Every structure is written in structure tokens, then in C-alpha cells.
Amino acid sequence: MVKNILFLCFFLLFMPPLSAQYYLQLKKRNKVIHTYASGDNIIFRLKDDKFYYDQMITGVTGTTIKFRFYDVTIQDIEVVKVPSRSSYGLDLLSGAALTAGVFFLAIDQGNQLFVQGEGLGPSDEVLIVTGALVGTGVLIKLLKKKKFRFKSRKYRLVSTAFLPEGN
């Protein structure tokens, strides 16, 4: 009898951590782009609003996201911004293009000043190459996608009861 009561007390003591916790997942065609849990900040825009909310998630249920002072249903969210989204390849490419453009101009100026002794003044060819490299780097940085709209079936915000492996 005492063993049963102790087992019941032990079971009830450790029961709350065993309950399922919900997570939000931003998916693109069933591939997880970003995962949000309780305590994470999310930047979102509601339908028919013109401004974004930056709130900390206090809880997630099956259909709602709980914040400090209010709750929002997942279907009311129209856009989610992911500011920390890293696309390593694009960041590397844009940084390399910007750096290469600046270094190409600097090396040409050093060559003209010290090796050829002609003084400062870039040639037209160097300006074209430098402008193309810097322009490409800036365009890649500006066109990288950070906002995800839920108007089409391509992107979804889904509440799940488990954390997938690798996140």
C-alpha cells in the first residue's frame, strides 16, 4: 500500500515535464525553414494590418500563439519576418563580390601609382568591373528573402507537438 502511494506521488511529481510542448514551424513545402518555441521572439503582421508586431512567445497551443497580454490564432497571421535567417552561400557570394570590387579598384590604383608611376585615376575598364562587382554584391544582399507570406500554399506556419531532430 505504501509502495503504491509512493509510486503515485512519484508519478504525479514528474508528470508535468512529460506533457507535450507545442512548437511553431515555418515550412516551405513541408521543409522546415525556422522553428519557434516558448521564449522566442517572432516578428509578424496580422491580416488587414499595416505594421509588424515584435513579440515574445509565452506559449503555443494547437491553433493559437500566446503572448504576454493577448493571444493570436495562427490563421490571423499573414506575414512572418525571419531576421536571423542565414543563407550561407548567398552571404558568402555577396561579401566576396563586394570585397573583390573594392580590392580590384585598390590594387589598380596601387599599380598605377607605384609600378607605372602614372598617378591616381582609374581607367574606364576598372570602373566597369568594380561597379559590376559591387553592384552584384549589393543586389544579392538586398534581394535575399526575409519575409514569408501565407497567401499561397507555398509557405505555412504550423503548430506541432514535438521538436524535429536537428533544430
Image (cartoon, rainbow, N blue to C red):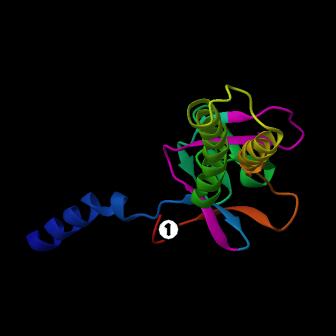
**Label 1: how many residues lie within 10 Å, few (<14), some (14-19) or many (20+)?**
few
- Quarter of the rendering containing residue 17: bottom left
Of 148 and 129, the residue lying toward us: 129
Magenta residue span: 30-53
Q: Position of residue 8 (x, y in %)?
A: 23, 67
Number of marks in the image?
A: 1
Q: Is residue 156 left or right of residue 95?
A: right
Looking at this rendering, what residue extends furthest in the left direction? 2
**Left-right relation of 106 to 81:** left
Relative placement, left or right, of 127 versus 86 is: right
Name the spot of residue 10 as percent of width and height, x first: 20, 64
Kind of residue sitting beneath label 1: Phe
| Residue 32 at x, y percent in the picture | 62, 67
Q: Name the residue carrying label 1.
A: 162
- Residue 24 seen in the current view: no
Provide the secondary structure element on which disc 1 rests.
loop
Residue 109 lies, with reference to residue 74, above or below; the image says above
Q: Is residue 32 magenta?
A: yes
Q: Residue at 80% across / 48% down in the picture?
A: 76
The answer to if 65 sits in the magenta stretch is no
Most extreme residue toward the front is 117
Res. 101 in view = yes
Question: Could you tell me which residue is drawn at 65 percent across and 56 percent down?
Answer: 90
* Residue found at x 62% / y 36%: 116
Quadrant assignment, res 124: top right
Residue 166 placement, left or right of 93: left
Q: Nearer the viewer, residue 130 or 86?
A: 130
Residue at position x 32%, y 62% in the image: 15
Q: Position of residue 125 (x, y in %)?
A: 80, 45
Q: Quadrant of the N terminus?
A: bottom left
